[in-house]
Amino acid sequence: MSISQQFVADRLQQLKTRLTHAGDFCFFADLDTLPSIFGVGALLSRNKTLGAGLMRRDFASASVLGNTPSWVRDYVRLYFAPKTPTLYHVEGIKRRPDDWPECPIPAYLDFSSQILTLPDVKISDGNMGSPTTNCEDASEEFFSSLPFDKIYHRGSTWLLKHREIILRRHAEVLIKAELSLVHLRRLVFRSEAEKALGLALVPMLLMVPSDVDRSWFNASRPFLDSLTRTESGWSFHVANGGRGDTVIYVVPLPSGGTEVRRSICSFPTTWPPFESVDTSELGFPIAGHRKRTLYLNGHRVAEW
């Protein structure tokens, strides 16, 4: 039996009284991927994304993906709530690479609960990479059986007894092939500065409700917290900044070239004045800028 909209509304209303994120069916993506998502007007399954050449940045762990049934790659996959353990591993600009991929500037697409009533929808009660996870066609009976206290658990999961909670927090809603942005409720960003960058990259985001809510993120690695215009120009603040972090400021020139300046953070979090630098010293390409642009540790974090 499929799920009715009335059942979904009633059940989520009950859950919401004690579980904060009940109803937040979400997908996180790096800001650089938003233009292609909104250009298509839908989230696409992994296979459709790869087939269309739209995979700008891959956040999937190769080892986890290898343990996931192959048919899952034909589905769009949403979590029941934000801040999953996977996001902990991939979120933010990493100072040193590790065994997980990197999602430098994450944002959430938060979808309406109506997705549960769409055709060809499946629900899992845990991580699809685990052999103990059950995944079934969406039904009121299976939805009611889900371990919601563990799915919506938030907080530390470092104890061994929390392994099952880690499994359950990765419960998913899987939609066949693609999910139209018609069902998008809002976007959630980590900071006002990152929201502004999202709007600069995708102007149509002005038509989409959006929030800044740091509680949806781990926010433990360096990121641009604010960019403020002042009488003398502008100022910035990097959250979690540390010694060696580098901010690059690129200014387009009337001649068509660019002026590049650099500031390297010193201990503990002091940013000296910007100094001119040759682009050959940067380690990443700087070209074609039509707007003032800020980079943090090689990643674009602001544009105006």
Image (tube, rainbow, N blue to C red):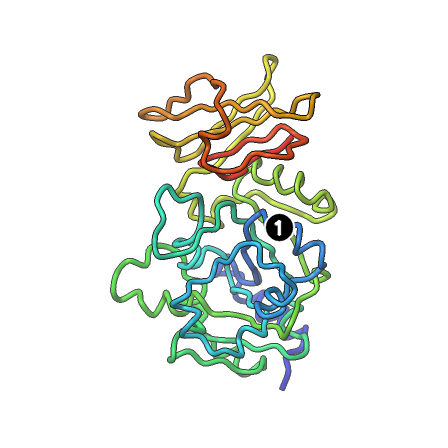
For residue 232, above or below residue 236: above
- Give the crowd class for mark 1: few <14, some 14-19, many >=20 residues within 10 Å: many
Left or right position of 298 against 39 = left
- Kindly identify the amino acid type of the residue bearing the numbered disc 1: Leu
For residue 169, above or below residue 222: below
Left or right position of 107 against 43 = left
For residue 137, above or below residue 160: below
Residue at 57%, 72% in the rendered image = 174
- Rendering coords of residue 285 (x, y %): 53, 37
Secondary structure of the residue carrying tag 1 is strand
Q: Pick whichever, 273 or 9, lies toward us.
A: 273
- Rendering coords of residue 44 (x, y %): 63, 65
Q: On the image, which quarter does residue 147 sit in?
A: bottom left
Residue at 48%, 61% in the rendered image = 19
- Rendering coords of residue 132 (x, y %): 38, 80
Q: Pick whichever, 157 or 256, lies toward us.
A: 256
Q: Pick whichever, 232 or 84, lies toward us.
A: 232
The residue that disc 1 covers is 187
